[in-house]
Image (tube, rainbow, N blue to C red):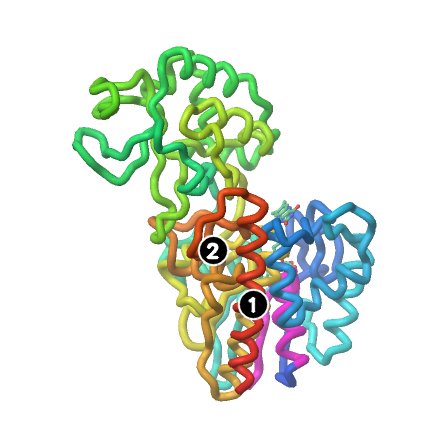
Amino acid sequence: MIVHIVGGGLAGSEAAYYLSSKGHDVVLHEMRPVKMTEVHRTALLAELVCSNSLKSESLTNAEGLLKAEMRMIGSVILDCAEKSRIPAGKALAVDREMFSLCVTRTVESSGVRIIREEIKEVSPKSGEIWVIATGPATSESLAKSIRAMTGGEDFYFFDAVAPIVTRESIDMDKAFFGNRYEESGDYINCPMTEEEYKEFWRELVSAETIPVEDFDRKHLFERCMPIEEIAKGGENALLFGPLRPVGLVDPRTGRRPFAVVQLRRDNKDGTLYNIVGFQTRLRWGEQERVLKKIPCLRNAEIVRYGVMHRNIYINSPKILDVFMRLKDGIFFAGQITGVEGYVESAMSGLYVAFNIDRILRGRDPVRFPRETMIGALTHYITEDVEGDLRPMYANFGILKPLEKRIRDKLERRKALSERALRKLESFLENLKS
Ligand SMILES: Cc1cc2nc3c(=O)[nH]c(=O)nc-3n(C[C@H](O)[C@H](O)[C@H](O)COP(=O)(O)OP(=O)(O)OC[C@H]3O[C@@H](n4cnc5c(N)ncnc54)[C@H](O)[C@@H]3O)c2cc1C
C-alpha cells in the first residue's frame, strides 16, 4: 500500500513523517517551487506563511494543551519548532527559515519520496491511500476537482465568521431565551436600552479594522457585509439589521427592547454560541472591547474571534467521517478540513496519519476522547457543528465540560488540561494492548 500526500505544508509534512516513521511507503506531492501559491515564498516544506509563532505553551491556554497532547504522540512540527526556537516568553516562536529547513530535511531523510508537482485531480487506484492537505491556498485545478467531488455547495472559498462565546460566560440574568414572534425558543437574546445601543454603535463605528485586500473586497463584501460596515450606514442602521428587536419581548419588562443582539447555538452540545450577524473585520482586541458594551456579554469569554478572509475549506461535518475520510482511500487534513492555525493544521495531519497507520496494520481507526483537545477539535470539525462549518481553532469551549464547575477561569483551564493529558495517556496506553 502506498500513501500519497498532497501538500507539504504543516499538515502534510506531519502526516508524511508520521507514516514514514511507522514504516509505510509514503509519497509527498508538493507543487512548490514548480508552481507557487499566492502566500508562500519558498520551496521549503511547512513554510509559515505569516507569523513565526506557534502560540502559547502554557497549559492554561488551549494551544498549549494541544501542543502537549501532540508531543505525547510524536510531532515532527513541534520537534523542529523546539530546535529552531527563539525567545518569546510563554510562546513557542521560531526562526522561520531554520524551522522549515528542519522539517524539510527531517521528512526527506525519513524515507518519504518528495515529488515537486501540482496534483490536479485525486482518484486513488487500488493499493493507494490519498491524503489531501493542500491548505487555504489549494491550487485552482485541484480546488475545482475537490469541489466536484464534494458536491459544489460544500466547498468554500472564503470564511465570514462571527465571534463565538462560551454559553457559561453569557450573563443570563440580563438575557432571555426566545425566537422572534414565539413565546419561547432556542436563541439567547441580549436586550439593550437606547443609551446602551448608542454607546455600542459609537464604539463599533470607530473601532479599528483589519485592512481589506482587493480580492477580499470583491469576493467578501458582495456576499456578506461586516457588521461595522452596516453600522456605518447610520446610527439606526443596525436596528433594521442584525440588532432589530421586532418580534421579541423581554419577559422581565413585558416590552420589546430598543435593540437585541441574538446568539445562536454553535455546537450540538450547546457549550458555544455565535453572535448572529456579527461577521467582522475588527481587530481582535477591538472585538473584545466592543462586545463588552453589550450588557449580557460584559464578561463573555470569546473562544473564536470573528474573521472575514479568503480561505479554501470544505464542509467537513457533512462530507467527512470523524476520521476525516471522504470515502475509502481519500482523506483530508489541515486547514482545508476547517481547522484553523498552524498547530491545529499539524494536529489534523497527525490525527489522520495515526488512523491511517492503524488501518494499514489491520486495526480500526479510533476517535480520540472528547476530553482531549485533539478529540474535541476533530469532533467539532466533523460532527458537532450546528449548521455549516466555520473554521475553528483550539479552545477550551469545545472540550467536554468538567463534572464540577470551577468558577475561576485559570483554575478551570488547569483542571481541563490536567484531565485531558491524563485521559490521553490512558487512551494511548490502552491502544498498545
Ligand atoms: C495569509 C495567511 C496567513 C496565515 N497566518 C497564520 C498565522 O499567522 N498563524 C497561524 O496559526 N495560522 C495562520 N494561517 C492559517 C493556517 O494555519 C496556515 O495557512 C497553515 O499553513 C495551514 O496548514 P496546511 O498544512 O493546511 O496548509 P499549508 O501550510 O498552506 O500547506 C499546503 C501545501 O499544499 C501545497 N499545494 C497546494 N495545492 C497543491 C496541489 N494542487 N498539488 C500539490 N501541492 C499543493 C502548497 O504549496 C502548500 O505547501 C494563515 C493562513 C493564511 C492564508
Above-or-below relation of 371 to 184: below
Taking the magenta stretch, the answer to whether it contains residue 368 is no
Cα–Cα span, label 1 and label 2? 14 Å
- Rate crowding at label 2 as few (under 14), some (14 to 19) or many (20 or more) other CA atoms within 10 Å: many
Element carrying mark 1: helix
Taking the magenta stretch, the answer to whether it contains residue 7 is yes
Q: Position of residue 206 (x, y in %)?
A: 55, 17
Q: In front: 262, or 126?
A: 262
Q: In front: 11, or 38?
A: 11
Ligand 1 sits in quadrant: bottom right
Residue bearing mark 2: 399
Q: Residue at x 75, y 67 (%)?
A: 104
Q: Residue at x 80, y 55 (%)?
A: 85
In magenta, the rendered stretch is 1-21
Determine if residue 79 is in view. yes
Determine if residue 13 is in view. no
Above-or-below relation of 32 to 275: below
Q: Earlier in the sequence, mark 1 or mark 2?
A: 2
Indicate the quadrant containing the N terminus: top left, top right, bottom left or bottom right. bottom right
Q: Which quadrant of the view contains residue 239?
A: top left
Q: Residue at x 42, y 33 (%)?
A: 224
Residue bearing mark 1: 422
